[in-house]
Amino acid sequence: MSDINYANRKLAQNVVALHAFEQVARFGNFTGAAEALGLTQSAVSQKVKSLEVELGVALFKREHRGVSLTIEGQRLLNVVHPAMSQMSNSVASMLERKSRPRVRISADFSFASFWLLPRLSHLRSELGEEIEIQILASQVPPDKLADDCDITIHVGPCGHLRKGDVMLLQEKVIAVASPGFLANQSKIKSAHDLVDQQLLTLSKPPTAAWQTWQGWFGALGIQDERSRNYISFNNYDMVTQAAVSGEGIALGWLGLIDHLLNDGSLVQVSPEVVVSEAGHIMSRDHESLLQGPSLVFDWIADQAASLETIVK
């Protein structure tokens, strides 16, 4: 333990010198590093020299037109450069967010396309265009550390709601198709009649929680075997476009495809509605002091107020 503490103390004492070393290696000379760091050339040279003395090795070969790394210097750079780059990018991102409000929203494809985008201009007009809105559409929730998202909106079980989360849309799913497709089919009276129809499906990653045809039939107690293959897509936009084009029957999420039902592009095929214990859950870091994410979060929650469930 004492060795670890000693190394930590030495690291803390030499962070600035390590940064100077990394910049000198990047530019190949002390002049470029000094300009990048806002220091004098002699100050940068002194920091690198003190680091070499501290470590007991030469890190650079001093040459007529600059410097080149020694073997020990290259070994150190292989470790220092990725760490410094990551720290620099993180600090730059934080400073940018401080100077220019930015809200990054991770939402699954269906919610982003059918719920969020139609309301985006309304959001910007109410909250002001000085807030930069970034939407990252994804099939699965983001890695919180890697994707740096302020707000996430993804399908999850109601039981996973945390304090402050909002259930924007509970999952209510029906079977839908175009009027033209149905006109060419024998009469469909119930979900049992759909088992051997041409079904359109959204491919589902293992961690995804949304409804599938198998789950939809299972919720209705239908265990019949299918004799036809599904037509599968990895994007819900494509599923609905295929359904509107008359390629088959799709699952439709109420609250997302209502406009297609209202304008007659799609119709409900059978009377059954499957309501699951999942839905589109909106989350954010409520400890964040940034105003932009708080404003956008509250605006979206207000828009879905008739369906929201906030965990108290």
Image (cartoon, rainbow, N blue to C red):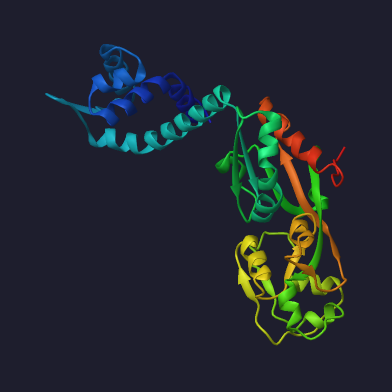
Residue drawn 26% across and 22% down? Answer: 32
- Depicted 229 relative to depicted 160: above or below: below
Residue 209 place in picture, x, y as percent: 73, 59
- Out of 216 and 126, give the one closest to the viewer: 126
Residue drawn 76% across and 51% down? Answer: 280
Asked if one can make out residue 53 in the rendered structure from this viewpoint, the answer is no
Residue 152 place in picture, x, y as percent: 68, 44
Residue 1 place in picture, x, y as percent: 53, 31
Asked if one can make out residue 243 in the rendered structure from this viewpoint, the answer is yes
Residue 40 place in picture, x, y as percent: 29, 12
Residue drawn 55% across and 22% down? Answer: 99
Answer with the quarter of the image where residue 106 lies.
top right
Residue drawn 76% across and 69% down? Answer: 176
- Out of 127 and 181, give the one closest to the viewer: 181
- Depicted 20 relative to depicted 81: above or below: above
- Depicted 303 relative to depicted 294: above or below: below
- Depicted 293 relative to depicted 34: above or below: below
